[in-house]
Amino acid sequence: MGAAVLRHLRVLAVHTHSGRFLAPPQRAILVPPDLPHAVISSPDTEMRSLYIARDAMPWRADQCAVLEINALTRELINQFGQIPSSTTKAVPMADWLPYCWTS
């Protein structure tokens, strides 16, 4: 699965073989599926991760991307974070991605 590291209160860094990607709180870092990486943050950082099934990603990425997060996405993440994981189901990313962020 790919992951978008979202909703954090400090600067986050994702390190990969191809470089280091930094994101302030109003941004997210998209990590492609199967990409070896390390997330670096300060001990008091609060963050949320959104895991995306490989077949739900409408593109093929080979490196991380830093994305701008809009207010709708931020609120969706806040609400999703309150739902127990046993009650969630996968939704195709193509259905909601265009409304949530820009690169």
Image (cartoon, rainbow, N blue to C red):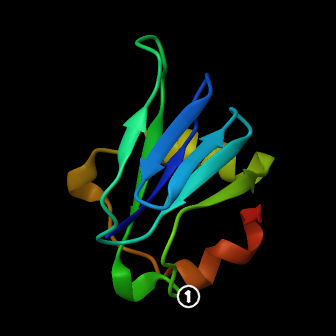
Viewer-side residue, 6 vs 73: 6
**Count of picture labels:** 1
Task: Work out which residue is located at the far top of the displayed protein and give it.
Answer: 44
Res 11 → quadrant:
top right
Q: Secondary structure at mark 1?
A: loop
Task: Work out which residue is located at the far left of the displayed protein and give it.
Answer: 86
- Which residue is rendered at x = 27% and y = 57% of the image? 87
Q: Residues within 10 Å of mark 1 (few under 14, many from 20)?
A: few
Q: Is residue 14 above or below residue 47?
A: below
Quadrant in which the C terminus appears: bottom right
Q: Is residue 56 above or below residue 34?
A: below
Q: Is residue 93 above or below residue 41?
A: below
Horizontally, is 49 left or right of 13 in the view?
A: left
- Which residue is rendered at x = 29% and y = 70% of the image? 34
Horizontally, is 48 left or right of 94 in the view?
A: left
Task: Work out which residue is located at the far front of the displayed protein and give it.
Answer: 18
- Which residue is rendered at x = 42% and y = 54% of the image? 16
Q: Residue 9 in the image: x percent, y percent?
A: 61, 23
Quadrant in which the N terminus appears: bottom left
Res 84 → quadrant:
top left
Horizontally, is 39 left or right of 86 in the view?
A: right
Q: Residue 6 in the image: x percent, y percent?
A: 55, 44
Residue at image mark 1? 59
Q: Residue 30 in the image: x percent, y percent?
A: 54, 60
Q: Residue 70 in the image: x percent, y percent?
A: 79, 51
- Residue type (three-letter) at the residue carrying disc 1: Trp
Q: Is residue 81 above or below residue 63?
A: above
